[in-house]
Image: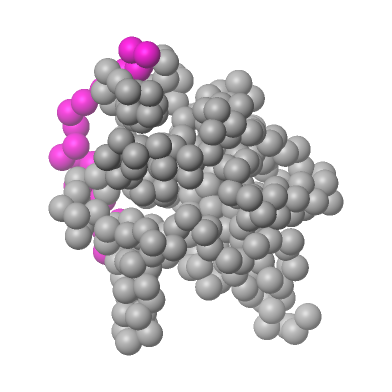
């Protein structure tokens, strides 16, 4: 390995540690559950947190995406075994009886068109929170990087949902609830390119191809747009994030109403009487 590569690895880990300390993401005695997918970002998150000395375990959800899911699950199992990290594998079929793609298809037949990424996000958050609570996780770490966050901020702006961005940041959410496990993003200031370089230098067994269900999503369009802007005006993504963080405290002040209650149907934390997961399930069964 070249000396420049060794220097990069050290600086990357220091950036993650600095993010954790500055934004108070993890306490020394926390039980950190990392939501892993088998990709570069979440695998890197799991590896770096373990290397930094935090108490970590991983959880992957089998989303039943054929060969793609099988490859990712096999990779993360191999990785965790080699690093002596406990891994929890949750079957989507056990939790909801079918795959995300099947849900999307059934809804489409009913005239309800929801993209796979939206459905996936709803069911993943539900599973992670329920299973994480049973595992007594202090927080759930995700592999979201700077590019991901810049895309979300930009998407909210384009769609006129600026106030939704008040929930973003290195530690997400505005309100707390005894049943809700806080989400944290240790790679918040690491770019996607940096994360991929870190992953490749460490020779992690990961799939670098995007999820086959995400190729036609709005996020993919925004990602392409920001990548083109980054080439024309280097620093665009960082400017979006650092500019956003300057206004985030004020944004949070303006979003003071509302409480987290419990869903009338499933008892999970929700901002409404019926949570998004139960809304989705009711549409499937109606």
Q: Is residue 90 located in the magenta-colored stretch of the structure?
A: no
**Residue 229 sits in which quadrant?**
bottom left
Q: Locate residue 148, reporting x and y percent.
A: 42, 59
Q: Locate residue 128, reporting x and y percent.
A: 53, 33
Q: Nearer the viewer, residue 208 or 9?
A: 208
At horizontal 26% and vertical 23% (from top left) the residue drawn is: 272
Q: Does the rendering let one see residue 186?
A: no
Q: Is residue 253 located in the magenta-colored stretch of the structure?
A: yes
Figure check: 193 above or below 249: below
Bounds of the magenta span?
A: 242-265
Q: Does the rendering let one see residue 73?
A: yes
Q: Locate residue 162, reporting x and y percent.
A: 19, 51
Q: Nearer the viewer, residue 6 or 63?
A: 63
Judge left or right: residue 260 versus residue 106: left
**Residue 28 sits in which quadrant?**
top right
Judge left or right: residue 89 versus residue 230: right
Q: Locate residue 210, reporting x and y percent.
A: 53, 63
- Where does the C terminus fall, quadrant-wise? top left
Q: Nearer the viewer, residue 7 or 63?
A: 63
Q: Residue furthest front?
A: 109
Q: How is colour applied across the structure in the image?
A: one colour
């Amino acid at each position: 390995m070249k000396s420049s590569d060794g220097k990069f690895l050290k600086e990357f880990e220091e950036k993650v540690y600095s993010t954790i300390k500055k934004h108070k993401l993890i306490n020394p005695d926390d039980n950190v559950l990392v939501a892993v997918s088998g990709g570069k970002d979440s695998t890197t998150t799991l590896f770096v947190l373990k290397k930094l000395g935090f108490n970590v375990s991983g959880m992957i959800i089998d989303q039943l995406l054929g060969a793609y899911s099988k490859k990712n699950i096999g990779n993360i199992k191999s990785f965790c075994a080699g690093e002596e990290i406990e891994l929890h594998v949750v079957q989507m079929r056990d939790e909801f009886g079918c795959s995300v793609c099947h849900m999307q298809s059934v809804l489409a037949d009913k005239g309800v068109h929801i993209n796979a990424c939206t459905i996936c996000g709803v069911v993943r958050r539900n599973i992670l929170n329920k299973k994480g609570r049973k595992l007594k996780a202090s927080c759930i770490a995700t592999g979201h990087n700077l590019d991901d966050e810049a895309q979300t901020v930009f998407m909210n702006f384009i769609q006129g949902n600026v106030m939704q961005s008040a929930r973003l940041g290195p530690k997400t959410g505005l309100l707390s609830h005894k049943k809700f496990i806080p989400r944290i993003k240790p790679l918040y200031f690491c770019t996607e390119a940096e994360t991929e370089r870190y992953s490749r230098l460490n020779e992690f067994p990961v799939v670098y191809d995007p999820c086959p269900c995400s190729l036609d999503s709005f996020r993919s369009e925004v990602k392409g747009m920001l990548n083109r802007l980054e080439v024309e005006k280097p620093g665009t993504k960082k400017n979006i994030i650092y500019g956003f963080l300057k206004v985030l405290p004020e944004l949070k002040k303006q979003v003071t109403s509302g409480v987290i209650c419990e869903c009338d149907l499933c008892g999970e934390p929700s901002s409404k009487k019926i949570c998004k997961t139960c809304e989705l399930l009711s549409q499937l069964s109606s």
